[in-house]
Image: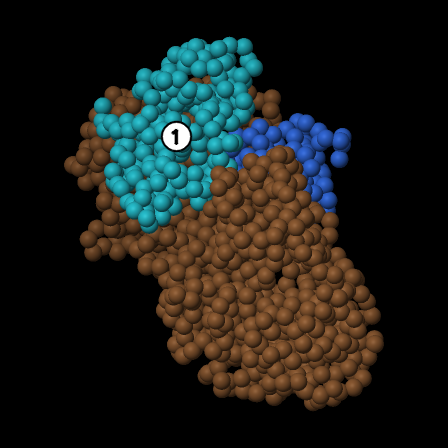
Chain colours: A brown, B blue, C cyan
Amino acid sequence: MTSARRLQGGGLIDRSRRIRFKFNGREYFGHPGDTLASALLAQGVRLFGRSFKYHRPRGVIGAGAEEPNALVQVGEGAYSTPNLKATQVELYEGLTARTVNGWPSLAFDIGAINNRLSRLLPAGFYYKTFMWPKSAWMRYEHHIRHAAGLGHTPSLPDPDQYDKRHAHCDVLVVGAGPTGLIAALGAARSGARVMLVDEQSRLGGSLLAAPAIIGGQAGLDWASEVEAELRSLPEVTILSRSTVTGYYDHNFLSVNERRTDHLGPVPSDTPITRERLWRIRAKQVVLATGAIERPLVFDGNDTPGVMLASAVSAYIHRYAVAPGRSGAVFTNNDSGYQAAIDMTNAGMEVRAVVDVRVKAGADVSSAVADLGIPVYLGHVVPSVQSGLQGLKRIELAKLSADGRDILSHKGLVDCQILAVSGGWSPVVHLHSQSGGRPCYQEGQACFIPGASVQDERSAGACAGSFSLAACLQEGADAGVSAAAQSGWPGGYVDVPVAAERVEAALQPLWEVPAGALAGDRVKKFLDFQNDTTASDIRLAAREGYRSIEHVKRYTALGFGTDQGKLGNINGLAILAETLGKSPGEVGTTTFRPNYTPVTFGAVAGRALGEQLFDPVRKTAIHAWHVRRGAMFENVGQWKRPWFYPREGEGMHAAVNRECLATRSSVGVLDASTLGKIDIRGPDASRFLNLLYTNNWDNLQPGRCRYGFMLGEDGMVMDDGVTTCIAPDHYLMTTTTGGAAAVMAWMERWLQTEWPELKVYLTSVTDHWSVMSVAGPNARAVIKTAGCDLNLDAEAFPFMSMQTGEVAGIPARISRISFSGESAFEVSVDANQGLSLWEAIMTAGRDYDITPYGTEAMHVLRAEKGYVIVGQDTDGSVTPVDLGMDWIVSKKKDFIGKRSLSRSDTDRPNRKQLVGLKTQDPSRVLPEGAQLVNTPQAERPVPMIGHVSSSYYSAHLGRSIALALVKGGLSRMGGTIYAHLMDGSVVPATICAPVFFDPENERTKS
Amino acid sequence: MLQIECPWCGARDQEEFQYGGEAHIVRPENPDALTDIQWADYLFNRANVKGVHAEQWCHAAGCRRWFNVLRDTVSYKILAVYRPGEQPPGGEE
Amino acid sequence: MSAKHSPLVEIETPVIRPGSDGQTLFWMQEHAFCVHLNLRGDPSSSGFSEAVSAVTGIALPEHPNTCASSEHCRVAWLGPDEWLLIGVHEDFGHAPLEDRLAPLHHALTDLSGGQTILRVGGENWRDVLASACPFDLHPRVFGEGACAQTVIAHTNVLLMPVKDPDRGEALDIVVRRSFADHLARWLMDAAAEDGFELLAPMGSA
């Protein structure tokens, strides 16, 4: 394989090294500095893929992020990445790539039949044909997507690592072309923190692709000097291979940095991240994102060999590739002439410059005349002819003065490359994302940034200033002023001299009329990736679409991975013409993040897996639970022991054993996760009266009370036991999941509604390790562990608290029970939590003390009918619905009280908490099961409730359940039916929700 | 991602804050004296403005203070921040 | 007196894991078992700040985001009516402070079991934290004498730049006990490329 099209000298490639790679199974080689596209073009490859809808052969059209055609799947297996642009993929040794669209092979593509059938596939075809009947869409969709398919998602887990980084800077400069480089320098010399972000592998932007003289030296040398100075400044950060993908509120921008893609797959034991997603907060932003050349819209403008004029120049200058033996230029402005000059200098035979205008700029005219290139003014290329390897010849025709008609056919011109230029589209994407509205500039026929909405300014080509001299001046001004506005006024930079051409104005020509050779299948492409043509836009307009946003969705214009960087402006201009409006009146579609696709890996970053996806909160006793082989349950962010299986024991056996041990001897639960709030101040009890439904005036020090907290809507929000430590000092417990929200809620009332209350809150959740020792032998275990308190029921009654020592550790001991057993809840400084737990386990050995998890806790509390907020309540349940009127004070005001007498909360037949006993005692209802009144009924069956908690109670030897049932409290003894997913119907008897020890004899003992 | 000026801690990332809805909704002195409709109005009805909105935020991961923010719900620009009990700058809304 | 266990009981130390270039540009060391006292009160009420300075020898920092320190303790601003007092020794000031503050509306709360300190340093510590911390850590805006409450990897933290006597410029991260294991694991993961050293904890009992 030879590099037939590689030039002997020049270019930014290292000819001394060869890089081997494969494309569609064939071996090729390139050099460091090459992209996949440039290396393939160098070896004469012209066909890169098939188009999305019509499966037409496609070649490379661009040289960067704007490329719509040359999409490739790079890498193998887990490392495979779909839909990369060959124009951006840097070569590495052993790279493998294949074209993403083309089956079974690129050269012979079955889908190409769509091209023959294209009259049957107009815009909106899929909507019109397959959306009816609605139910069938799912069936069609699979086949359509398969036929369409762009690339393949790897089926293996991604072995690469990704991360994120927050950054802050005074000035963020986006784009490191001449404008961005000088802006960054002007800003950085002030001492400001400057970030310069550029998507290419090296800085320089347009200077990489086109020769220029800046301040008397080669443009790239100037760029290297600027880069060297920037790198020497400590507060400057330069990110290459990094794309600013989004511009969000308050000058927050996201940057996708590709750190290793140019190196190929990194071994998984090397701790280097493949991509990094930067999250940058900038005080000021300078957008220097340049401009993208527009194609011209004519029949066959998608033929391989038709390329952007600037891309042709880029391949010649940057990559030393002459993309064909012969060429021509088709342009409506002066910049296209450069490609003719470059192609000639690269040894290509340039056979025509076809200029829509009747007059070209003096400088470019004389330059091409000197090279002897024929120029056809007032002419167009209405169509092309192609062979198997792409473009063969172009049609030449004279255009009418108004640009609407072809006056005469002028014959054919042989050429392999047609460099086209329809003018330039400033990259206004980020300006638009920042909230700005691009406005239409008639003279240059392009959209430029409108007024700034955030702290940003555009400079250079992205602001519509296309001459190098103007770019340098604007960049310098923007950098210096951005630094000054960020608080760093000392920036400066001399603007070097750059040659300027005397230019003639561009002449917009949005669509080239069909020529003499036009067949009946004229296709003038706007969006190459989605095969959207000029006639699709006209069809949409004929069918009544007026808004560009609607036309976009109807025709798929701009929907591809290139997001319409090439085609959108042509499309909206054609819509404008059709509607008799100006492009400015039609406006652009909304530019949304991301500018280029971002991988899911970068979005996820390090937040992966059990450990790092979300914080994992652990109690001080966690390590013991792990050693004991506990299975864990997530409760909020906490890991709580769920049950402790013994060898060969399943969940149900373990839970039954833990429940029975607690009821018959003693169990111990790690209750450290409950929220704990220290409440202090002279108004503490007044505050509790407002928060809780019951009365707190008469709670004595050393006594505990259970309370319900409601939202202002009257619905149960949280519950827990609060202990009076001193008249102005209380300790509140909350549910595990509700702790943070309850704390914030309490602070909010204090700070915003009742600032006069003298109350301070402090979260002490993490300070205390709490273990609940429960069961008939609980007292004996605490005694054995060593306690300096009289633990007898009379001296230390239920719902009281004392401070003392257990096993030599200072502790608060509370007689609180969520299990229905005689229980001692011991709280100690969490640094000593593990020690106390181990002491209790040792003390309990003779009683066969059994650690129990949350599942046994749930069973034990359900036997007692204790509710769990968030399981037996769902934000629509009042304390009255739970049958707990006794806890609701009639006398005082409290948050949510007024809502309890609203017409809806007051009505009969609300859902109320009841117990359920299945008539078959071995049948355990699934939680969430729907309850109805009859075993069979006409559909729709009125739903009258659901099962909220359901377990097998080993102690009672039967299943038990709690349920919310309409009017349940008045239906005791009645039968209700649970209709299950498997179609079975389970009858159950409604009963009181307390299944065990209704007199509380155990808890009090 | 907003950047919010905490009246105490200064400009911080939105990630540190918790949103609290419309500001300046005062809990009625004597809820029992209200009709269902008046109570429901306090409970449920909010201005939902397009434009300048007075709202509460809490610097949850910082000083844990609740405060008020004037924010344009269209542009997301923050026009002012002020402490609880204070009136928005520029007088009554 | 029974044994104390730090929140990082499950993470073995010391560990050295060099990064992609064989370097270790990040280190971390737990400073366990300090006395942490949370103080709430009105700094304008007479005798309040005097009580704090009498017991700690430190003037109560009343400016947001500042902290002050002496040889044995530090006081960090947490809010307009809230401070964190950290003492190195076990006998640090709860009782004497409570005595002096008794006439004033205040809340002095022992959180010693509820939080710990991760001290981090090394050439790239700011980059490692920036993997998941939205706060601007640049020395221009965040140096010694400053403190800030923010989040790292969805975990609330208090940050205090310090000079480590052995290792120089460093940062103390005060984190709640239950989150400490998560935060330490996050930082080790984030430091994998730079390389890290996990030192044996200070203050082990």
The quadrant of the picture occupied by the C terminus of chain A is: top left
Vertical placement of A256 versus C137: above or below?
A: below
Vertical placement of A29 versus B85: above or below?
A: below
| A996 vs C154, nearest the viewer | C154
Snapshot quadrant of residue B77:
top right
Residue drawn at x 36%, y 48% is C193
Residue that mark 1 sits on: C169
Residue A456 in percent (x, y) is at 65, 46
Looking at the image, residue C9 sits to the left or right of residue B40; the answer is: left
> Could you tell me which secondary element the residue under label 1 belongs to?
strand
| A953 vs A292, nearest the viewer | A292
Q: What is the number of callouts on the image?
A: 1
Vertical placement of B33 versus A435: above or below?
A: above
Looking at the image, residue A754 sits to the left or right of residue A783; the answer is: right
Residue A357 in percent (x, y) is at 77, 72
Residue drawn at x 61%, y 38% is A491
Snapshot quadrant of residue A489:
top right
| A627 vs A362, nearest the viewer | A362
Q: Residue furthest left?
A: A846
Q: Residues within 10 Å of mark 1 (few under 14, many from 20)?
A: some
Q: Is residue A484 visible?
A: yes
